[in-house]
Image (cartoon, rainbow, N blue to C red):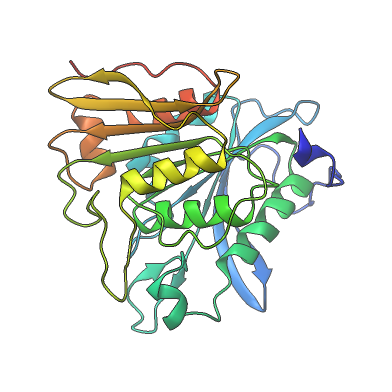
Amino acid sequence: MHRAHNMKYTLFIFLLIPLFASAQIDTILSSNIQRTYKIQLPDNYDLKKRYPLLLVFHGYHYENLGMPEYTGFDKFTNKHCIVAYPHGLKEENGINYFWNSGGGLSVNYEGVDDVKIIDNLIDTLTRNYSVYTDSVFITGHSNGGMMVYRLALELSHKITAMANVSGSMMFDSIVPEYPLPVLHIHGTSDPIVPTAGYSGPIWPSMNVDSVLYQWAAWNHCNPKPDTIANTATYLYVQWTDKTGKKMVMGSFIKNQGHDWAAITNSGWNVAENIWYFFTRREFNNFPE
């Protein structure tokens, strides 16, 4: 893949990292700002093997420490995957954490370059751990999902696939350099990030249908999606490219709101199905 052609990867393990620990808090310095992240290694981590890397982004106001349990990715230590939970920056009010995902947030926090920070974090993790660099995945909830879209636009040369939960894209003025598989999961009754989009000055978000059609065009997919399933509980659509590969997928959970855990509790395991998408397997456990 193209991502392996333009990057030089070196395995380097800091002596400060206890090899027996499956999870720990670490820091990264980027643009003179120190940020923390939680790193979770798989069971029986082996330096002789290479593992996929999954980055999980929290939503607005929340912190990263509770994300493993909230999302269900805390069970992924047996999935042979390295999982990292980056931490956003605290707002000037000293209360809420956020990601500069674009739109109105860029006006208020244009000095916060979260794209650069995550770019540096990916490089740091691929140096410090045994990462399979052709399998770098990103997912996030709400503002974290918005940030995932921005990273997909600006770091498509490093990212293998993305999944958004209850967020949307805030702008489409940047064209991704490479095609990127996209999974969008959204509750149809989401009051926080409505699927119809929002045109407010601070949290503008694009209409979700427009986002998916735009990514289908960028990924050179067929212009119209196939409806895979449409029940009283969910609508599942996908766009494919000419080779038949699934490149853009939308899963709309009917009568569900904004909360990741609530969607999972409704019978559709969000974390598991994101992982199935990343590993190019079919979704399962759809609620009937």
The residue that appears at 34% across and 54% down in the rendered structure is: 142
Query: Where, quadrant-wise, is the C terminus in this rendering?
Result: top left
Total label count? 0
Q: Residue 12: x and y, percent?
A: 83, 47
Residue 93 visible in the picture = yes
Query: Where, quadrant-wise, is the N terminus in this rendering?
Result: top right
Q: Is residue 137 left or right of residue 223?
A: right
Q: Nearer the viewer, residue 59 or 80?
A: 59
Q: Residue 126: x and y, percent?
A: 74, 45
Q: Residue 8: x and y, percent?
A: 87, 46
Does 187 sit above or below residue 85?
Answer: above
Residue 25 visible in the picture = no
Q: Residue furthest front?
A: 223
Q: Is residue 184 left or right of residue 160?
A: left
Q: Is residue 74 left or right of residue 113?
A: left
The residue that appears at 76% across and 41% down in the rendered structure is: 3
The residue that appears at 44% across and 81% down in the rendered structure is: 107
Does 141 sit above or below residue 72?
Answer: below
The residue that appears at 41% across and 51% down in the rendered structure is: 145
Q: Nearer the viewer, residue 243 or 42?
A: 243
